Image: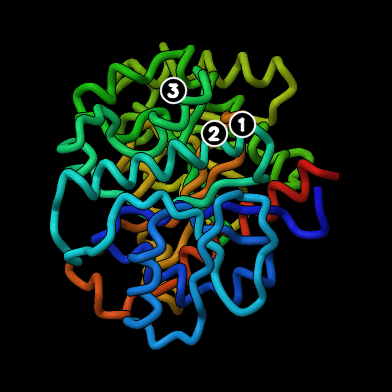
Amino acid sequence: MQSKPRVAITMGDPAGIGSEIIVKAYAELAELADITVIGDAAVMERATKICNSSLTIHHVTDITDEVVADGINVLDLGLVDDVDFGELKEEYGAASLAYVERAIELAQQHKIDAIVTAPINKQATRMAGSEYAGHTGMLADFTDTENYAMLLIEDGLRVSHISTHVPLEVAVDHVTTANVLDTIEVTHEALRGLGIDKPVIAVAGINPHASDGGLLGERDETEIRPAVEQATEQGINATGPESPDTVFKHAAQGTYDAVVAMYHDQGHIPVKMLGATTDSPVSGVNMTVGLPIIRTSVDHGTAFDIAGKGIASEESLIQAVEMAVRVATEKGE
C-alpha cells in the first residue's frame, strides 16, 4: 500500500446530497486518503458552486492518476450532464448503480484499497431495473460472497444484522442456527479487522427477554442458542441469546464489542437513537462485512428534501472514510 490508502467514493444518486457532502468533506478526507470520486463531473462541478467551494473538479480517466492538491479527482462516467435535485428518475438510479459497479471492478483489480459509498435511492434503482434493496446485496453478488452482513457503527456501539431489508415476517424465518452462526463469524472477523484482537460478541434474542426460558417463544432456544454454542466451540467469545431490551445498552457502555441483531429495526433503532445524542445531526457508519473488498458507507439516505441547498451534514461521510482507512491500514500491515 502507498503512504495513504487509495479510496474511491461513489457519488450516489445524482439528485441526492452525495455530491455536496463530498465537496464539503473533501479537505478533511484528503488528509486521510488519496480520494477519487466515481460519478459525473458535471454534477460534482455543480456541487462546488452550491457549496461555495473553491475546489476545482479534475476529470481523470484512470483511478491511479495522481491526486491533485487543489481539487477533486473525478472518474467521470459521463452519465448525467444536468440534474434536478430531489427528483426521482430512472436515469439517476441507473447512474448510481453504474458508479458502484465500476468501484467494485476497481477494488477487485486491486487498483483501490477501499470503497466508500454515498447514498443511493432504492426507488430510483428499482426504476432502473435493479432487484437489490440497497448496496449490500449488490456488493455480495458482484463479489460472489455468500456469508456477509451489515455492520452499523455509532460511537462505541457496533451492531451486525441477520437480515436487513425484508418484511418482518420474513426476517423471523431468517433466524436459523446456520444464519446466526454465519453472522457471528463474519462479525468476529470484522472486529479483528478493526484491530480488536479478542472481541466479545453479544447475540440478541428475537423474542422479548430472549423468550424468558421458553415462555415467550421457542426460537431463542432452538435456533439462536445452538449458534452461540457452536461459535464458542470455535474459540469465539460469544454470549447469548441476550435480552434485546438491555443488550444494546450494555454494548454502548463497553461490555461487548458488538451485538448481533436479529432483524433490521432491532439493530437500527438503538444505533440511530445513540446517533441522535451526538453533536452532529447525522453520524455513524454502515459497513458490509464478509466481503473480499473493503466497503463502508454513510449511515443516511439521499435526503431529497434538502438536496441542492448545500446544508447537508458531511459528518457521516468523514466517519465512513476514517473507518475504511482504518480497516485498509490494518489489512496492509
Q: Residue at left 41%, top 49%?
A: 77
Mark 1 falls on what kind of element? helix
Circles 3 and 1, Cβ within 8 Å, touching? The answer is no
Circles 1 and 2, Cβ within 8 Å, touching? The answer is yes
From the image, tell me which residue sits under label 2. Answer: 105
| Residue 159 picture location, percent across and down | 49, 44
Q: Residue at left 34%, top 19%?
A: 174
* Residue type, mark 2 in image: Glu
Query: In this view of the protein, which residue sits in the foreground, 237 or 324?
Result: 324
Q: Along the horizontal axis of the image, is 35 left or right of 1? A: left
Query: In this view of the protein, which residue sits in the foreground, 3 or 298?
Result: 3
Q: Residues within 10 Å of mark 3 (few under 14, many from 20)?
A: few
Q: Along the horizontal axis of the image, is 177 left or right of 47? A: right
Q: Along the horizontal axis of the image, is 274 left or right of 13? A: right
From the image, tell me which residue sits under label 1. Answer: 108
C-alpha separation, residue under disc 3 versus residue under disc 1: 13 Å
Mark 3 or mark 2: which comes first in sequence? Answer: 2
Circles 3 and 2, Cβ within 8 Å, touching? The answer is no
The nearer-to-camera label among 3 and 1 is 1
Confirm whether residue 250 shows in the render: no
Confirm whether residue 186 shows in the render: yes
| Residue 198 picture location, percent across and down | 76, 38
C-alpha separation, residue under disc 3 versus residue under disc 2: 12 Å
| Residue 266 picture location, percent across and down | 34, 42
Q: Residue at left 36%, top 29%?
A: 163
Q: Mark on residue 141? A: 3
* Residue type, mark 3 in image: Asp
